[in-house]
Image (spheres, helix red, strand yellow):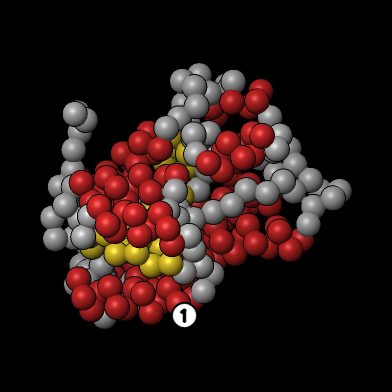
Amino acid sequence: MPQVTYSFPGMNFVITGAASGIGKKISEELLTAGASVLGIDKNPEPLNQLAAMNPNFVPAAVDVRDTDGVKKFVDGYAAARGKINGAVHSAGIMIASPLTSYDEVQAREIMDISFWAGVRLIRTTHRKKVVAQKASSVLISSIAAYSGDKSNFAYSGTKAAIQTAVRSIAKEIISVGARINSVSPGWVRTSMTKENLESNLIPKRLLERSFLGIGETEDVSGIVLFLLSERARWITGQDFVVDGGYLIG
C-alpha cells in the first residue's frame, strides 16, 4: 500500500503516450484514484486492454501529431464525461543525433512528437468549452535538457524547449486559474529505455551515474499526480527533476 495516495473522483484527464511506460503508469494511477482518463496513443491494443479493465479509461488510438484527430477525441470525451481537469503529455521518442551524421527528418520527428504535439495538446485541452476551472497539466521533459549528453542534441534540445515553453504558457493560462509544470525524469525502466540500451544509444556508463539506480515508472508518476492535485495549487511554471541522483553524479 503506497504511503501517499490521491483521490480524483469525478475528474477527467487526457494522457498521451498512454499505451506504455510513464504515460501508462500515470493513467493507471489516475484510474485507481477514481479519475476518468482519455488515453491517447497510436498503438490501439494496449489502450483497448486498459479500457477492458476499467470503464473510466477511454481509448483514443491516434497519432499525437494528428491535430484534428486529437481534437476530435478531446471534444467527444469532454462532451461525454465533462470538462477536462488536466492533461499530461508523455509521448516521445529518442533517436541518436550526432552532429556529423544526424538525420534531419528524425530530428524533426523528435521535436514534433515531444514538443509541438504537447503544445497543441495544451491548446486543445484549454479551450473555454472543454477546460475545467483550476485545471492542472504536466509536460514530460527529461534530465537530457540539463546534461546534454553526447550525440543527443535533438532530444536534449527538445526537452529543454518543453521547460521554457511551460514557463511561458503558465503565464497565459493562469488567467483562467489553470496551472502547468514539467517533470524531468532520469533513466527509467521502460521499453524505450531497453531498446536504446540494446542499440547502445544509451551507454551503460550513464546509468551508473544514477546513485539510486535506474528508476521505475512509479517513481515518476507520483510527482505527476501530486502536480495534478489540489495540493500543488500554488505551483506553476516549474520543472521537477526525478533522476535518482543522476545530475549530481
Name the secondary structure under disc 1.
helix
Residue positioned 20% across, 67% down in the render: 133
- Give residue 82's position: percent from left, percent from top: 19, 72
Q: From the viewer's perspective, is residue 15 above or below residue 24?
A: below
> Residue 52, located in which quarter of the rendered image?
bottom left
Towards the viewer: 39 or 12: 39
Q: Residues within 10 Å of mark 1 (few under 14, many from 20)?
A: few
Look at the image and tell me whether residue 27 can be seen.
yes
For disc 1, the marked residue is: 68
Looking at the rendered image, the quarter that the N terminus falls into is: top left
> Residue 198, located in which quarter of the rendered image?
top right
Residue positioned 66% across, 23% down in the render: 205
State left or right for residue 152 relative to residue 12. right
Look at the image and tell me whether residue 119 can be seen.
no
State left or right for residue 202 relative to residue 171. right
- Give residue 223's position: percent from left, percent from top: 33, 40
Residue positioned 36% across, 74% down in the render: 73
Towards the viewer: 117 or 50: 50
State left or right for residue 242 relative to residue 231. right
Q: Amino acid at mark 1?
A: Asp
- Give residue 71's position: percent from left, percent from top: 40, 77
State left or right for residue 246 relative to residue 198. left
- Give residue 227's position: percent from left, percent from top: 30, 47
